[in-house]
Image (spheres, grey):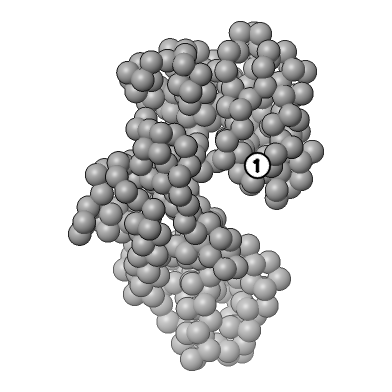
């Protein structure tokens, strides 16, 4: 089986035997056709597939599923051409990346996904089909609680503090070091010597605003600084974390009916204060049935291809789910990064 996880930053393809054994793995660049164009997305997926098939007889592939962010109708026939060129008998079925992210966390056919990475979205899945979706409306008008939202909240709070004449607080120092610093803010706790402070706090605020407006996606990277500062008890960061978790859980509860809630995306799969706060809220008042964490999405796509194709019984599929979705520690010769 071949499984594809194609997103806005990278593409991953996994090849698995029916017993779940990983036979190949390949990675390539962005595979989102809506964000990067159809031809570049198809090329990236094809490159990752070619790498994953090294050492594998492509004629033995019996099922393929591609989970693609920003999927478009024209993608499936284009991928079928790529599969044929590489010797795979039949092209892949194409599904959205949201469904695959859910499957990466649980074998249960019905439940909910809560994803927070650069963006944020929640979805309800019923019998391995997308049934409802909430948020995922993009950085400008939605994605509440996402990495971008957290980073923007941090920048907003910091420039507001500087506008009031204050340079106090760990988060202020971290964000200032990120935008105005002479070195990495991760190389120890920054102090005044790590930041090229301006003639006044207001001047510092103006410089951060100009730099953020010139590259707004830079704000998403600030989320890691919020996690660090919140972990050390910075009040400004703790407030942002609490608000982000509240937004994310409120979004999840809009769609959740029953079954597990799968946490996905870098913000919620990485240990840290946001993940911890989200779990506490989900398991607090009116607790959900269970909380799971997404694992390898390419392997999950291969698993769903086998299950949906009737190649695995429901019982055998449940048993093998953790084998298919085992995180990839290293390529181990299965394909270059």
Horizontal arrangement in the rendering, residue 104 relative to residue 36 (left or right): left
Q: Residue drawn at (74%, 37%), measured in percent from left and top?
A: 74
Where is residue 75 drawn, in percent x and y? 71, 35
Horizontal arrangement in the rendering, residue 71 relative to residue 171 (left or right): right
The quadrant in which the C terminus is found is top right
- Disc 1: CA contacts within 10 A as few (<14), some (14-19) or many (>=20): many
**166 is higher (above) or lower (below) than 37:** below
Where is residue 20 drawn, in percent x and y? 44, 17
Q: Residue drawn at (69%, 31%), measured in percent from left and top?
A: 76
Looking at the rendered structure, the secondary structure element under dot 1 is loop
Residue 47, can we see it?
no
Q: Residue drawn at (41%, 34%), measured in percent from left and top?
A: 127
Q: Nearer the viewer, residue 51 or 313?
A: 313
Where is residue 219 drawn, in percent x and y? 58, 65
**182 is higher (above) or lower (below) than 62:** below
Where is residue 67 drawn, in percent x and y? 57, 35
- Residue marked by disc 1: 71
Residue 319, can we see it?
yes
Q: Residue drawn at (39%, 53%), measured in percent from left and top?
A: 255
Q: Nearer the viewer, residue 67 or 15?
A: 67
Quadrant of the image occupied by residue 249: bottom left
Q: Nearer the viewer, residue 60 or 25?
A: 60
């Amino acid at each position: 089986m071949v499984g594809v996880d194609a997103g806005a930053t990278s593409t991953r393809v996994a090849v698995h035997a029916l017993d779940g054994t990983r036979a190949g793995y390949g990675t390539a660049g962005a595979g989102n056709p809506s964000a990067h164009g159809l031809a570049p997305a198809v090329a990236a997926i094809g490159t990752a597939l070619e790498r994953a098939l090294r050492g594998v007889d492509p004629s033995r592939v019996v099922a393929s599923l591609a989970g693609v962010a920003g999927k478009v109708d024209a993608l499936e026939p284009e991928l079928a051409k790529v599969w044929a060129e590489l010797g795979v008998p039949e092209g892949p079925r194409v599904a959205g990346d949201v469904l695959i992210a859910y499957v990466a966390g649980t074998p249960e056919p019905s439940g909910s996904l809560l994803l927070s990475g650069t963006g944020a979205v929640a979805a309800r899945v019923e019998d391995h089909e997308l049934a409802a979706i909430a948020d995922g409306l993009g950085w400008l008008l939605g994605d509440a609680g996402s990495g971008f939202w957290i980073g923007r909240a941090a920048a907003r709070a910091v420039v507001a503090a500087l506008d009031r004449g204050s340079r106090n607080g760990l988060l202020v120092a971290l964000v200032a070091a990120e935008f105005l610093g002479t070195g990495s803010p991760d190389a120890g706790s920054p102090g005044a010597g790590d930041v090229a402070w301006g003639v006044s706090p207001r001047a510092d605020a103006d410089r951060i605003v100009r730099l953020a407006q010139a590259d707004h996606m830079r704000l998403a990277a600030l989320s890691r600084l919020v996690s660090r500062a919140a972990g050390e008890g910075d009040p400004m960061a703790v407030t942002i974390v609490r608000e982000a978790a509240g937004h994310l859980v409120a979004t999840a509860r809009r769609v959740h009916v029953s079954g597990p809630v799968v946490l996905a995306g870098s913000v919620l799969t990485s240990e840290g204060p946001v993940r911890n706060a989200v779990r506490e809220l989900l398991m607090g008042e009116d607790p959900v049935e269970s909380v799971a964490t997404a694992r390898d999405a390419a392997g999950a796509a291969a698993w769903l291809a086998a299950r949906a194709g009737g190649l695995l019984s429901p019982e055998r599929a449940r048993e093998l789910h953790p084998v298919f979705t085992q995180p990839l520690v290293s390529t181990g010769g299965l394909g270059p990064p």
